[in-house]
Image: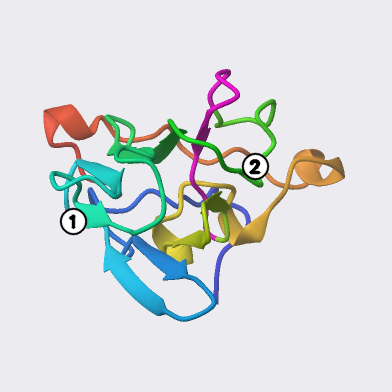
């Protein structure tokens, strides 16, 4: 049983939670695990995830110092995150990926997944809104650069 009297944390080991991109078109479906700190997506020969019918460099996903995965769209496409939401980036072409975030690139839809225990959103699937008085904030994020481990 979870003790709700003490703040909990969703902080996990660096890169934990099997972060993955699910890539879908009308004809294909595939999974691409995010194992690198920077993934380039496009039709170009040097891209880590090569997809036909999109720009040579269409998007970049960067594993940042906060243990978050940040998408930047370089080509045409849509994103479903609110750029003004907490945890996203102010650039309207970038967003912090959370489980279920999706973006498009030509005929492709790409969905980000990461197991809930490692997705650094609110614990217990919390949301911004009226529960803040009932849900204490979680402990500070570990300093991954210093090798700090979550408790």
Q: Where 119 falls versus 92 (above or below)?
A: below
Can you give x and y, in whole percent of width and height, for residue 150 in the image? 29, 47
SS for dot 1: loop
Q: Residue at x 15, y 48 (%)?
A: 45
Q: Which mark is residue 25?
A: none
Q: Would you call the spot at circle 1 few (<14 residues within 10 Å), some (14-19), or many (20 or more)?
A: few
Q: Looking at the picture, how far across and down is residue 56, in whole percent?
A: 30, 40
Please say which color scheme the image uses.
Answer: rainbow
Nearest the eye: 28 or 80: 28
Task: Give the quadrant of residue 31.
Answer: bottom left
Which of disc 2 and disc 1 is earlier in sequence?
A: 1
Residue 145: x %, y % from top left: 16, 28
Indicate the secondary structure of the residue bearing disc 2: loop
Across and down, in percent, residue 36 comes to 16, 48
Q: Which region of the structure is painted magenta?
A: 89-99
Q: Is residue 151 left or right of residue 45?
A: right
Q: Residue at x 43, y 38 (%)?
A: 71
- Specify whether 100 is left or right of 15: right
Residue 118 in which image quadrant: bottom left
For mark 2, does the 10 Å Cα neighbourhood hold few (<14), some (14 to 19), or many (20 or more) residues?
some
Q: Residue at 52% of width from left, 34% of height from top?
A: 95
Is most of the magenta stretch helix, strand or loop?
loop
Name the foreground residue: 5 vs 113: 113
The mark found on residue 81 in the picture is: 2
Distance Cα–Cα, label 1 vs label 2: 23 Å
Q: Residue furthest top?
A: 90
Question: Which residue does the numbered mark 1 point to in the structure image?
Answer: 35
Is 19 magenta? The answer is no
């Amino acid at each position: 049983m979870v003790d709700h009297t003490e703040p909990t944390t969703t902080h996990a080991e660096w890169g934990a939670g099997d972060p993955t991109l699910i890539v879908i078109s009308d004809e294909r479906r595939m999974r691409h695990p995010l194992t690198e700190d920077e993934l380039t997506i496009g039709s170009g020969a040097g891209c880590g995830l090569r997809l036909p019918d999109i720009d040579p460099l269409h998007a970049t996903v960067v594993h940042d110092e906060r243990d978050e995965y940040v998408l930047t769209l370089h080509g045409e496409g849509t994103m479903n995150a609110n750029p003004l939401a907490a945890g996203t980036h102010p650039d309207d072409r970038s967003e912090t990926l959370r489980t279920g975030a999706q973006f498009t690139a030509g005929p492709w839809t790409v969905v980000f997944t990461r197991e809930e225990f490692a997705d650094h959103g609110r614990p217990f699937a919390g949301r911004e809104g009226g529960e803040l008085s009932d849900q204490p904030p979680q402990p500070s994020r570990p300093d991954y650069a210093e090798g700090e481990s979550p408790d």
